[in-house]
Image (cartoon, rainbow, N blue to C red):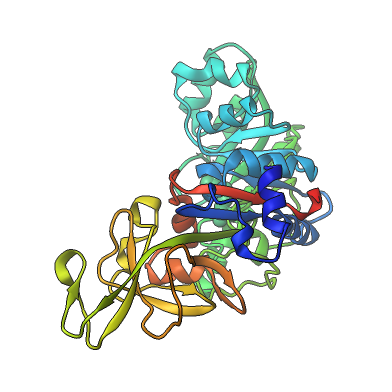
Amino acid sequence: MWMDVLLLYGGMEMEWLNKEMTDRAWIEIDFMNLKHNVSFLESIMNKRCKLMAVVKANAYGHGSTEIARYLNQLGVDSFAVATLDEGISLRKQGIEGEILVLGYTSPFRFQDLITYNIIQTIIDYDYGQKVNEFNQNIAVHIKIDTGMHRLGIKTSDVLQIKELLLCKSLNVKGMFTHLCVADSNDEKDIRYTQNQIDNFYQLVDELKKDGIEIPKIHLQSSYGLLNYPNIPCDYARIGIALYGSLSELGDKTKIEPNLLPVLSLRARVALVRELEEGECMGYGLTFLAHRNSKVAVVSIGYGDGYPRNLSKGAGRVLIHGQYAGIIGNICMDQLLIDVTDIDEVKEGDIVTLIGKDSDKEIKAVEVSSASDTLANELLSRLGSRLKRIYKDLSYI
Ligand SMILES: *Cc1c(COP(=O)(O)O)cnc(C)c1O
């Protein structure tokens, strides 16, 4: 990592990038922007509330070990993952603090929860009984279904919840719910969300009346925090906002998100070729040159997680500080861009698919929107074939 850092900042030129890390297609992660996002998100949380960094799906494509390690250095000591194996991987890499598995873990693997000191979500009453029957004092958070109807025990099943709280082998460290329309400004959705929040706190109060104090409660994810910031709770489970993006283009949130994108996606030009007017190009011959054209073949494709439905002009990239449209069909490992109007494009030039190039920028959420999906999906699908470079100015 040191070498990359020195090479990145050893000179002003992008060409100083480590040539082996940037030979084909790669991701650059900007830790300073991640640090900025952490500070901003913490600044809009209640005093009592702490950041629970959601690092599932390889930290939304950013590299879970490196992201969690850096967050550990910043003092973040609470993480959420989707699967047990994601949690184990973090532990094996020396990540400290609490790790909560948000999803299902098979009873065959309960021992690993103890071995690796990982907290399991109780996804319903029967599951809670199974964890209890394992008889090993497993740390858990109980999931409450307040309206999403995916995982969790219904607030009306308060007797079941109380029963679980009395189970000898359940070390209940927390209780949480998930808001399912917190991103929406629609009046009906706001009422639905408020109802979810109210039902959750009614349950908390009812337990309190019985003398049961749940150590930690949490309910917001990124949009929950940005749209419902003043909820008294112990954690906010933040994913997409931590990485400096919203999920959808044009979303308006109650709190203006002061976020900086953490990830850039770049690739090299493999070659540049001339196409005569009337010639076609690529799979399906879907591109027809309406004039004598210059086309660059770029070494990244849908096999790297770049969406194929950005073919035929739907997507664009930056090269030499200018926009260039994607032409023809995107291939598994390569794509084509029209550089007829851009001077001196040559083999080895850097193409930016997400990120800044001089004064222009392509945001992840713009790419995902053009591809008809969320930034969350686009980022989490960025593949293992992409090398990941971590830039941290504070090391220098
Ligand atoms: C993925 C996930 C989050 C994070 O959501 P973002 O919208 O990315 O902040 C929070 N809570 C649960 C239960 C999740 O599954």
Q: Nearer the viewer, residue 39 or 173?
A: 39
Picture quadrant where residue 170 is located: top right
Q: Is 1 situated above or below 199?
A: above
Q: Nearer the viewer, residue 396 or 394?
A: 396
Horizontal side of 315 relative to 238 (left or right) equals left
Residue 363 screen position, x and y as percent: 54, 69
Q: Nearer the viewer, residue 332 or 200?
A: 332
Picture quadrant where residue 86 is located: top right
Q: Nearer the viewer, residue 75 or 355?
A: 355
Picture quadrant where residue 264 is located: bottom right
Horizontal side of 250 relative to 310 (left or right) equals right
Q: Is 209 situated above or below 288?
A: above
Q: Is residue 155 visible?
A: no
The residue sitting at 64% across, 16% down in the picture is 137
Q: Is residue 379 visible?
A: yes
Looking at the image, which residue sits at the far bottom?
291
Residue 17 screen position, x and y as percent: 61, 56
For the N terminus, the quadrant is top right
The residue sitting at 32% across, 74% down in the picture is 295
The residue sitting at 55% across, 65% down in the picture is 183
Horizontal side of 390 relative to 393 (left or right) equals left
Total numbered circles: 0
Q: Is 274 situated above or below 334?
A: below
Looking at the image, which residue sits at the far top?
135
Q: Is 136 situated above or below 86?
A: above
Residue 80 screen position, x and y as percent: 61, 40
Residue 75 screen position, x and y as percent: 80, 42
The residue sitting at 50% across, 73% down in the picture is 249
Horizontal side of 225 relative to 193 (left or right) equals right
